[in-house]
Image (tube, grey):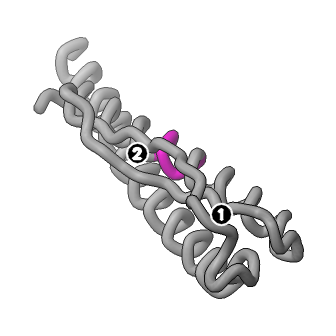
Amino acid sequence: MSLSGVTNSALSGMQAQVTRLSATANNIANVDSSNYSRLSTQFSTTPDGGVRADLSQSQQPGADGEGVDIGQEMLELTEASLFFKANAAVFETGADLWQLLATIKRD
């Protein structure tokens, strides 16, 4: 994987986590809606080495028909935040390496 491939992969990872955060925010906003069907996020790899996030709605409202489980949603928020930060660190490292390579080539 090239350096640009690494940064593109990290960028797609960040975008996938934004999709996940959006679904989680929607679930939390509907925590008191008993007929709400929870959104979940499924991740898959792309041919270029990135990641893609797809949303789906559960077939039945909440766990045991009780709506959204706020504990599960808080876990989703925490995981998405950590994964986003990890991808951001990879992206920044890749950008720094590009800058270093450009400096070496220029000198």
Q: Which residue corresponds to the image point at 75% horizontal and 76% vertical from the top-left?
A: 67
Residue beneath the point at 77% across and 63% down: 36
- Locate residue 99: give its quadrant: top left
1 or 2: tag closer to the N-terminus: 2
For residue 104, what is the image quadrant?
top left
Q: Is residue 99 above or below residue 40?
A: above
SS under mark 2: helix
Crowding near the residue tagged with mark 2, few <14, some 14–19, many ≥20 C-alpha atoms within 10 Å: many
Q: Nearer the viewer, residue 61 or 54?
A: 61
**Image quadrant assignment for residue 21:** bottom right
Horizontal arrangement in the rendering, residue 85 relative to residue 34 (left or right): left
Relative to residue 79, is residue 55 depicted above or below? Answer: above
Q: Residues within 10 Å of mark 1 (few under 14, many from 20)?
A: many
- Residue at 62%, 66% (x, y): give it: 60
Identity, as a three-letter code, of the amino acid under mark 2? Gly
Q: Which residue is mark 1?
A: 38
> In the picture, which quadrant includes the N terminus?
top left
Secondary structure of the residue carrying numbered label 1: loop
On screen, residue 77 above or below 42: below
User: Which secondary structure type mostly characterizes the magenta part of the structure?
Assistant: helix
In the image, taking residue 97 as reference, residue 30 lies left or right, namely: right
In the picture, which quadrant includes the C terminus?
A: top left
**Viewer-closest of 71 and 103:** 71
Q: CA distance from mark 1 to mark 2?
A: 22 Å
Residue range (magenta): 14-18
Is 16 inside the magenta-drawn segment?
yes
Which label sits on residue 58? none
Q: Residue furthest right?
A: 32
- Residue 13, disc: 2
